[in-house]
Amino acid sequence: MRHGPGLAIAVLVAATTALPLHAAERPAAQHPGADTSSTAKANATLERRRMLADVKSWRYQLRRIEIDEVARSRADLVVVDYAPDRVYGVELPFSAADVQRMQTKPDGSRRLVVAYLSIGEAERYRTYWNNAWYDAPTRPAWLLPPNPRWDGNFPVRFWHPDWQAIVLGSPAAYLERILAAGFDGVYLDRADVFQELDTENPRAESDMARFIVRLARHARALAPNALVILQNAEELMRRAEIREAIDAIAKEDLLHGVEHDARANPADMVRTSLADLRRARANGIKVLVVEYLEDAKAAARADQRIRAEGFLPLVAERSLGTLDHHGALLPE
């Protein structure tokens, strides 16, 4: 689900100050002839899962991001856009020093800071945007008509090589730039766009799964401990290759607000999403949930129900323009 201009799906690079593996997580000693590449992959997976297991609170802000405010937060994980200023195709991304400041808690300990990345929609405020694309005859083959719900956002044929080249595979690609800036990763949004394209492409779901797996592998070739956080598209948890590729899934509007209001979602919808999210948790995948609620009592009830599932909740305001909305409703 998109939130409008300035909103930017997630790969986390391992914390530079990561703690050693717990004893129970240490791999068995290698024997002569052991597959060291498989062992290294298994070790990296254990470390990524340990990093996320240590996350007890999180925040999500994509507009009006203030470095000092993030640095003052007590949250263990913060999701932000990689460029706080972006307009008319010009982005002013956070510097490596900015990222490092946001990664440091007030007590000097380490927090994870991940960057939002849309893999299913193009955004007109990104550097790749060409204003000629507003006219249908001059749109690239991968660009679809605008999303009527969010101004400036355009669904894409995500399987197209030219779109994937914008996302990853070169120093100018978004994944590379995010990791080079020192972010702990990327937070992948709009993977669920495949649901809107299955009539055009009957293989849309499997093509999205392949794209996510490719992105995860590429990220870990750059940084072996890179974590991948997927937002929504929880039905992909039924695929073994996705459960192996990602380390966390974040679900928006699990209990309320599928129509962008505060009403409870249909019970059958909630049951279906819960089944997929429970499958993720059973496979060691961290489950984050964000509810957009303004009423403190409703927020408290949602928080309690989400925690009872073993998921980590967040209550935010839907425009994602503040960091502390959750704290105002649900003090830590």
Image (spheres, helix red, strand yellow):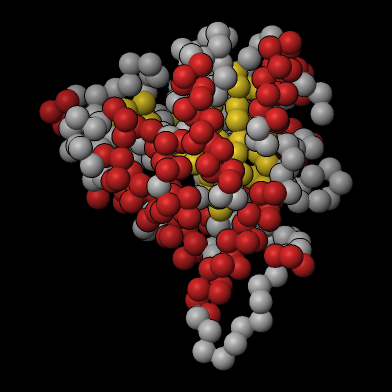
Q: Is residue 134 above or below residue 191?
A: above
Is residue 158 left or right of 306 when viewed as pictured? left
Quarter of the picture containing the N terminus is top left
Quarter of the picture containing the C terminus is top right
Q: Position of residue 165 (x, y in %)?
A: 31, 51
Q: Residue at x 61, y 36 (%)?
A: 288
Q: Nearer the viewer, residue 51 or 72?
A: 51
Q: Position of residue 247 (x, y in %)?
A: 55, 50
Q: Residue at x 55, y 74 (%)?
A: 39
Q: Is residue 259 above or below residue 21?
A: above
Q: Position of residue 60 (x, y in %)?
A: 62, 31
Query: From this viewpoint, is residue 34 visible?
Result: yes
Which residue is farthest bottom?
32
Is residue 196 left or right of 150 when viewed as pictured? left
The answer to which image quadrant residue 14 occupies is bottom right
Q: Residue at x 17, y 25 (%)?
A: 136
